[in-house]
Amino acid sequence: MSWESISYWIEHHPGLASWVQALGSILAILVAVRVASSQKREQLKNERIRFERDCEFLKVISDRALRAAKPNPAEITVRDAARMLVGVSSIFKKIDLMSLPHASLIEPVSTIRDALQAAESSIEGEPRIELYFGSSEHDKWYRLIFLARNRLLEEINRIS
């Protein structure tokens, strides 16, 4: 069988063009499904990475809030702890509750935010900052931050 006979058969076969078109269409559909599938996998992977990053951020700032609310005198002065508390409170104020990675995180994050804002107001109203850190007011806000932080960590572990 020579190339001439194959070429003649291809040119004069009555249904060959429709078969080639059908096979081409099927191949195009399979490629489209494969591309869509890989894009979906990539999107899910990116969402998972974003979710893990957001959860790690929440863990870090909630730990920082806890350290700011109950400073270790051997590590930080009371005045610096008050500054740190105000700074952490500012970070929590900027968190958009609607953009949290899961709805169950809204309650503990907003509780920490509210407690930090209340502690910040108490510090601003106290002429001697060291008196605030020894007060029952401080203990109340610290307990609230501590409990909300633990709830936050539990929720992150549950949804991860």
Image (cartoon, grey):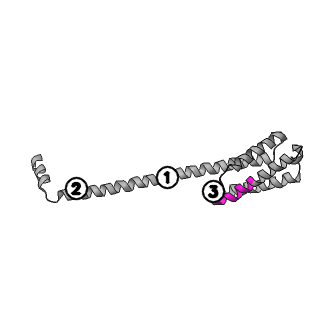
Which residue does the numbered mark 1 point to in the structure image? 43
Left or right of residue 51, residue 89 in this image: right
Residue type indicated by callout 1: Gln
Note whether residue 74 is visible.
no
In which quadrant of the rendered image does the C terminus lie?
bottom right
Residue type indicated by callout 3: Met
Instruction: Rate crowding at label 2 as few (under 14), some (14 to 19) or many (20 or more) other CA atoms within 10 Å.
Output: few
- Residue 43 at x, y = what percent? 49, 52
Left or right of residue 119, residue 2 in this image: left
Q: CA distance from mark 3 to mark 1?
A: 21 Å
Instruction: Tell me the magenta residue range.
Output: 94-113
Left or right of residue 83, residue 159 in this image: left
Instruction: Rate crowding at label 1 as few (under 14), some (14 to 19) or many (20 or more) other CA atoms within 10 Å.
Output: few
Mark in front: 3 vs 1: 3
Which residue does the numbered mark 3 point to in the structure image? 98
At x 17% / y 60%, what residue is drawn? 15
Residue type indicated by callout 2: Val
Note whether residue 128 is visible.
yes
At x 78% / y 56%, what residue is drawn? 144
- Residue 137 at x, y = what percent? 86, 53
Q: CA distance from mark 1 to mark 2?
A: 34 Å
Nearest the viewer among 122 and 150 is: 122
Q: Secondary structure at mark 3?
A: helix
- Residue 91 at x, y = what percent? 70, 46
Mark in front: 2 vs 3: 3
